[in-house]
Amino acid sequence: MYHVVVPVAPDDAQVATKVSTVGGLPGATEAVRVTLVHVADPGMDVTAVPAVADAIDRFSAAEVAVEAVRAEGRPTEAVLRVAQERAADCICVAGRERSPAGKHQLHPAAEQILLNADCPVLVTGEEAGDAAADHV
């Protein structure tokens, strides 16, 4: 199985894009499994977070195996730690369009993941109208 770690922020407007990208990987329904990572306080049920619940629903509808985990600490470090601990094959983060010229840039946390990950990082495109979203 190809294991993809997908960070999910509290108000992650890029969930649909991440699901679409990961779900579009070759053989996704048979050969891909996803671990959603949400940074939260101890004891919190991350599946109750709307963005995480949405991601679970979308991956389940796409017939991609999915689980959600709670991580502690700074989001960037937490995602990298979970990816390493679980021997992820890839981390999927969202891009964002920031300039009128249409140049794509990364959210600072996504950039740190890209620069520091021990595995490949897949950067998604962005949903129309989402230039100001706060996401990884």
Image (tube, rainbow, N blue to C red):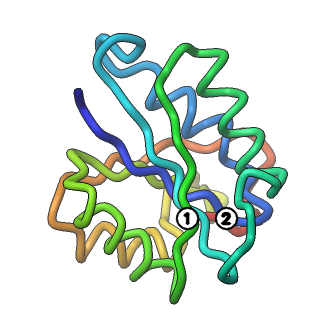
Q: Please, what is the three-letter code of the amino acid marked with disc 1?
A: Val
Residue 70 position (above or below residue 4): below
Which residue is most to the left?
118
Q: How many marks?
A: 2
Check the picture and name the quadrant holding the N terminus: top left
Q: Position of residue 26 (x, y in %)?
A: 29, 14
Residue 18 position (above or below residue 76): above
Q: Please, what is the three-letter code of the amino acid marked with disc 2?
A: Ala
To which residue does mark 2 refer? 9
To which residue does mark 1 refer? 136
Q: Position of residue 73 (x, y in %)?
A: 52, 88
Q: Secondary structure at mark 1?
A: loop
Which residue is located at x 19 percent, y 54 percent? Answer: 87
Which residue is most to the front?
43
Q: Position of residue 46 (x, y in %)?
A: 71, 60
Residue 52 position (above or below residue 76): above
